[in-house]
Amino acid sequence: MIKEGDIIKIILIDDPSKQYIKKVKKGVIFEDHKRNKLTFEDIINKHYGAIINNFIILKPTTQEFILYYLKRKTQIIYPKDSAYLALKLGINPNSKVLEVSAGSGAMSIILLKYLYPTGLLISIDKNLDFLLNTKKNLVDFCILENINYLKNIFFLNFDVFFKSIDNLFKIKFSSCILDIPELNDIVDKVFNLLDNSGTIGIVLPTANQVIEAIQKLKSSNFCDIEVEEILLRKYKTNYQRFRPFDIMTAHTAYIITAKKFTS
Amino acid sequence: MIKEGDIIKIILIDDPSKQYIKKVKKGVIFEDHKRNKLTFEDIINKHYGAIINNFIILKPTTQEFILYYLKRKTQIIYPKDSAYLALKLGINPNSKVLEVSAGSGAMSIILLKYLYPTGLLISIDKNLDFLLNTKKNLVDFCILENINYLKNIFFLNFDVFFKSIDNLFKIKFSSCILDIPELNDIVDKVFNLLDNSGTIGIVLPTANQVIEAIQKLKSSNFCDIEVEEILLRKYKTNYQRFRPFDIMTAHTAYIITAKKFTS
Amino acid sequence: MIKEGDIIKIILIDDPSKQYIKKVKKGVIFEDHKRNKLTFEDIINKHYGAIINNFIILKPTTQEFILYYLKRKTQIIYPKDSAYLALKLGINPNSKVLEVSAGSGAMSIILLKYLYPTGLLISIDKNLDFLLNTKKNLVDFCILENINYLKNIFFLNFDVFFKSIDNLFKIKFSSCILDIPELNDIVDKVFNLLDNSGTIGIVLPTANQVIEAIQKLKSSNFCDIEVEEILLRKYKTNYQRFRPFDIMTAHTAYIITAKKFTS
Amino acid sequence: MIKEGDIIKIILIDDPSKQYIKKVKKGVIFEDHKRNKLTFEDIINKHYGAIINNFIILKPTTQEFILYYLKRKTQIIYPKDSAYLALKLGINPNSKVLEVSAGSGAMSIILLKYLYPTGLLISIDKNLDFLLNTKKNLVDFCILENINYLKNIFFLNFDVFFKSIDNLFKIKFSSCILDIPELNDIVDKVFNLLDNSGTIGIVLPTANQVIEAIQKLKSSNFCDIEVEEILLRKYKTNYQRFRPFDIMTAHTAYIITAKKFTS
């Protein structure tokens, strides 16, 4: 049953390409691009999947939440990349993960899904606004999946380039994810924070940054360095004219992973 | 500390492209392609990430376990595809998922990671051997991540084309994944097994099958039909000569997702 | 020296992403998107490559002519596809080529470049308007490259589905290119028009059409059947931030080639 | 009719994936991988496309000649790349083209097809062996297409890094193609050799080289700089199971093009 506060996906029967993800609030009237109206009060207590006034009301998926609902204050890591990266880092409910930076929480959501219910995520961002936004996005995500992922995440607000992270933590991390524009000496520092055989993941948009990152990983004691990119190609669903869409996203980020070893 | 029974990754310092994933057993001596030897007894009680006799001993990641350790009796769904598919289906610890068929358990592993600790996976296969192999793979995977994922999965051994699944389950499923060569009337049947707004995922290697699947999804009451493929491009990690590898996997499967609605 | 009637490319020094391909006509004043003006009379007798009023005046290339100057009455075959297709068909100055249909002449231009000066291109279209437009495009292309490619092409205006092509030609063709939405019995007919070991090229946008085309090629006596697609990925040219563009063309057409054999 | 000295393609009726490109010589007996025999004397005076002893005898295409017959002394530029590059440089029968270096002649063949019969190609290589091999390949290619492309090419044997090319030529070139591992000051020198609005094409395998090349092109007076790569994806031709091949070539080269302007 749809309740007040639920996050719903609305699609138009006549034009399924138009999609909206919204939070149900009493008193609010939704309007599509053709000014067709849907009073949210009318859908409360209806079941998901129902048709109301030429709209289909659906439950959004994780991927839809991240792509179309998450409030963005930054460029996000896309689900195609983050889900794969989490597997390459071996995140599981026993993992302790450090994330620099939180961004808008798109990566945090995926990490928390792999960490739940006993893992730990420490999410650092120098920008307090970004942390607050990430927190808000996570609260909504917890509503969507009706799971309290928040108990597994701690937020830290500081700049890793100005405040030393060397002696900050009493634990070692099993994985660390870097999503920051400048690596500087952070790769070396992360090496010290990682457990033996711990994994590092770095997400970078440009080849120049990747070249620099590989160099730094090699000069620290990282092995098993891999660089990959993931291309997602979507197809039109006219079964009499099956073919790819005309355009696609050509680039989001290079994904780098490596493991710590100790001589 | 590495214990007997642990699953480890061995890489060669001199030639990191050579990688082996093995289970540690006393009395066993590992030999690489150049006949260098490693007595497993020597690595017990060493820490992960250590160098022993020109070998680095690492903890395998989820992705490495699936790609290089899983015993395959069938073609598997690749991590790049399965991790993304789980996000598109919205799998979470409240989900109830039906998987037809179990294959070798590559998809089951991913589903269990998203379902843990309170979700449910029912995995059907007509081939008992495949189920037993999947079970064995999952037992090893539980060892790797030290998590008891097995409590969330139930195996059923029958052929969905000969035995009716119509009245088999007293619950409705939030998601169903089909990885079978012939769809026949199974799409219609899955529709009835799904909860309102429930999601279906279909993994198919050929365009002909996708064309047929789209047609069936449209003739049942499925909406939000999407067809995608994921291409993974790997890069060489020589930072002075950064470039993609010469060859890549060009195709694994088309990934189809859709949602149930009810008029 | 730039003369009246020349086809030129204009780029803006301040914003090189803005590009225009124009024919130089006295009395015409060109205006860019910011209403900067360029009187064409001022550039006559200037040399190509010169800067005039913050505009650089360049000679367009074949690819630019096809993509940005050609008047389109139809979907065109893109240079990335047509140049490769011509090589796969083995077009050379001894070839006799049949093209159905002419479309807007984008493929004809490439064929003529490979056929010049002694080959033959017969270009059929049921739509007289399209033929006239193709002719006009070719006239402009001859101006651009200062070569009389027109002597190598003959236009025929009829519908291959209504008028029989069986006994139309006294010659045999070394290659035939089909760019038509419905193949019907045309593959069989082309077989008879082709020389021994002659090549056929078919350009089709959907997988359903390709599936049908392969079936027809196999049921006729065609061998060496190949299906390919070409993806063009463009990179940003900021050398400090080298990376692919965010979006790309994901699909133009599947390219099918085959050869006639005789038992 | 097949004559002695002709270059032919042999495919096996029973296994069309096995393909051979050979020169017909009396007295030679061809043997396939299963030791089936074909006496070349038997096929002289047969027509192309004929079946002889379970072999189909075909005329190779330009693409097949380059990929499967050309004697390689170096890494070649692939037809998918070279055909497109020639269009981006605007090569035509009025062009004067400088090619550094000749390599094995794979690019030269494409250039000559666009230049014939009145254009000029000057092909430089520091390695005399490579030039002799290119010449030999071109002689064979002239036999294949029965066109005398050789009259349009001049070979020069020297090292552009040791011998100055500044005052070597009395003509200006309309295009220059660089296929050399180190650019050094050659981009600047080429600028001086080019006609106004002349085009430069650079083919490079690594991102590091591309980053350096863009920088050099910008510091010389080149505009319209574009970097592209072409991915060729091949499909299986089983029309009941239409799908891409499992693996593909993931990378050959980045293609850079630019135009000279003069302030």
Image (cartoon, coloured by chain):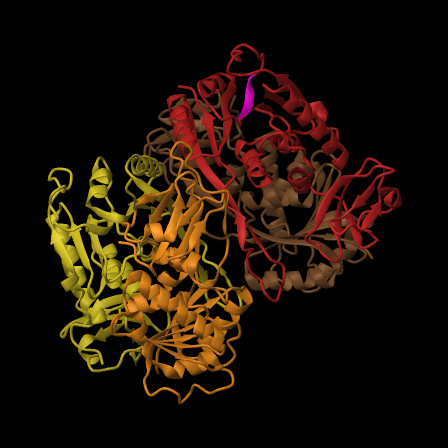
Chain colours: A yellow, B orange, C brown, D red
From the image, give the main secondary structure of the stretch colored magenta: strand
**Where on the picture, by quarter, is residue C55?**
top left
> Whole-percent x and y of residue B43?
33, 50
Residue B185 visible at all: yes
In the image, residue D36 sits, relative to residue A64, either above or below, namely above
> Whole-percent x and y of residue C89?
68, 45
Span highlighted in magenta in the image: D172-177
- Left or right position of B7 against A190: right
Q: Nearer the viewer, residue C149 or B16?
A: B16
Q: Residue placed farthest to the top in the image?
A: D167
> Whole-percent x and y of residue B184?
52, 79
> Whole-percent x and y of residue A62?
28, 65
| Quarter occupied by the C terminus of chain A | top left
Q: Nearer the viewer, residue C254 or D55?
A: D55
In the image, residue A12 sits, relative to residue B165, either above or below, namely above
Residue shown at the point (29%, 78%) measured from the top left: A53
Residue C247 visible at all: no
In the image, residue B160 sits, relative to residue D165, either above or below, namely below
Q: Nearer the viewer, residue B239 or A250?
A: B239
Q: Residue placed farthest to the bottom in the image?
A: B167
Q: How many numbered marks does the figure carry?
A: 0
| Quarter occupied by the N terminus of chain A | bottom left
Residue B176 in magenta stretch:
no
Q: Residue placed farthest to the front in the image?
A: B27
